[in-house]
Amino acid sequence: MDSPKKTATYPPGLEPYPLIGHMPQLLANRHRVLDWMTDALALQPTSTFVVHRPGGLRGAITANPANVEHILRSSFDNYPKGPRVVSMMHNFLGGGIFNADGESWREQRKVASHEFNTRSLRAFVARCVHDELHGRLLPLLRRATASGSCLDLQDVLERFGFDNICRVAFDHDPRQLSVEGDGDDAGTAANAGSSSFADAFRDASYLSVGRFRYAIPGFWKVKKALNVGSERRLRESVATVHGFADRIIQSRREEMLRRDGFEFEKHDLLSRFMASQGAESYDTESNKEALRDVVTSFLLAGRESTSSALTWFFWLLSSRPDVQRRIRDEIAAVRARHPRGDDALGFDLDELREMHYLHAAITESMRQYPPVPANSLHVQADDVLPDGTAVKAGWSVGYNSYAMGRMVSVWGDDALEYRPERWLSPDDGTFQPGSPFRFVAFHAGPRLCLGKEMAYIQMKSVVASVLEELDVVVDGAYRPRQLPSLTLRMAGGLPVTPSGKQQPTSQAEQAQENHVEFPLSLSLLLLGLIGMGPSSSPARSARRTGWIDMVHTVNLVIQEAQNASGIYIHDSVIAMGDPAITAAGLPPTIRKAFLFPFMQKRKQRCTTVVVVASAQDKIALGLRHDTTATHASLPQALDAEAAKFDQNARKGAARGRDMA
């Protein structure tokens, strides 16, 4: 049954302008477009927003899982890539699987799906990752550890990712991670062509995506016709990429024909696709181009996606020693179950599958920072989305996975909290994936990413091997700026200083670090108590936006305090809604002493933010949701305010005893 249609409504500040639509808002927020879109979607009753573009063009953006399922599965055929996306990416990707619709896509998907589901390909991927990891990435990090050097981890991971995907795609090693510091001048010179290919591939992907950013849609066509500016550079980059790929395809075809095809034992994707169709079938230019487009598509998909995910993961991990400790405990447990000697390198597929907490930690990072933060499709025929939003033929309709990962309506009151445990079964601690239509980092439906398992193999291998040996230290004051491109990158990279892993503490010391004795060594700071009107109140949405901003600020300040002091903040409770839910995680004495008196004074629904820490550490005592304390000023601020908050805590405890 069709959903009833509803007319798009906009809260103050989001109304479209005549003729130019939402262009002023988009331009004003271009430096924070993902967060602006998240705010806009959070203010919509169904997390769906109709965007007006210049010239009367419209498109719908959603963070509603029901709408996402409708678009990606239930009405899949009505939402293809569409002529706009296909034309913009055609010079680079041609008719490859990621730029194809209809029967062409189905045929490519059928062949690719068969190959990706073979255990032999997964084993080949694992070997490639193992070789790159232990032959290049870890030695590079060890050299930086020995010299105390600072590295741009984003750049390192992108080079690592490109080397790895090139080996998987057509068994070619561009040696991007070994260009500097390996002392192999001959090898570097011999791979000058590979470096040129890598640079051209990076430029071609960046410039192709740049076509989507023009304020005037289609302006890139004018520049292309005139062969000027970015379009000229794109043409040159694409020519380099295609020429390099064509030479590899021709060489591989000749090699397979010499060996009669069936005796050929290479396991890369190019060889697999050629073997499935027969090498002799690629004797025409059209067939060679089709094969080149397929391989280029997989290169594009694998080049930056895992490096983006790992970069944001290591940044998040730098402020969460509790998560880091649990990952290392899991790694140690896997090693204990599968002893292979002290000189064992890396982890096999079965060992990686046993790392459920690591899997959850990486997934939780991608929930908040998905490698591909948004995706757009084409509306083939008029339709009504499950939430009642009417979309017209010719519109674009997209889902914003970055915003979806921050929706309280999707993930609950702790949506902004990095909490790997949300993905684990409470019974046995195994990973529970949940609905693919609310976690869309790997797409969903018929176009579900074929390389999903390959990506997890690579990411888990890297994290487990690095954390088993090293600490990746990020400056606590560093706050990355987002750079939306083909993937979600960090503007300026991620500067890190690798160091030798600290020796594990004793079990007693670890227990003391992990727990706080209640209530003797406890200080509670009530960071915010925000009245929430009834659910139907017009002001509720605006207040929710303020709440989201406040919690984001609180999280950043907590991380700064933690990094500045080197002391782990033992627990934090950030909750929204019913006071009983807010207080549920605290011991009864604490609930009585600090929360209940406030609840009595404010009968309406309210929001409470509490930080729990050891009083003697004087950490987090001076934090308020409106604080402007920075990394440099925190030590002074903490000393100045500690006594005041301890005094307030004692008064609260006394009130609690009187009420009890």
Image (cartoon, rainbow, N blue to C red):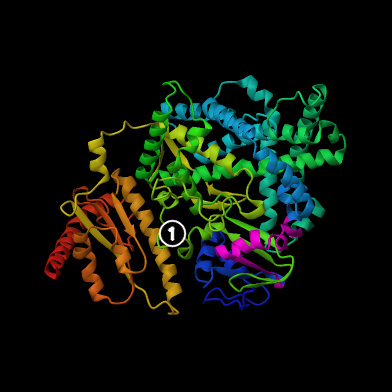
In the rendered image, which quarter is residue 328 located in?
A: top left
Looking at the rendered image, the quarter that the C terminus falls into is bottom left
For mark 1, give the secondary structure. Answer: loop
- Residue 444 seen from this side: yes
> Which residue is painted at 63% across and 62% down in the image?
398
Q: Return the residue nearer the eye: 218 or 524.
A: 524
Q: Could you tell me what secondary structure mostly forms the magenta stretch? A: helix
User: Does residue 532 show up magenta in the picture?
Assistant: no
Q: Which residues are magenta?
A: 56-85
Residue 427: x and y in percent read 39, 49
Residue 438: x and y in percent read 53, 58
Residue 2: x and y in percent read 65, 74
In the rendered view, would you say 360 is above or below 260?
below
In the rendered image, which quarter is residue 598 located in?
A: bottom left
User: Does residue 69 show up magenta in the picture?
Assistant: yes
Name which residue type carries label 1: Ala
Residue 280: x and y in percent read 85, 31
In the rendered image, which quarter is residue 195 located in?
A: top right
Looking at the rendered image, the quarter that the N terminus falls into is bottom right
Q: How many marks?
A: 1
In the rendered view, would you say 165 is above or below 258?
below
Left or right for 265, reference 474: right
In the rendered view, would you say 383 is above or below 474?
below
Residue that mark 1 sits on: 415
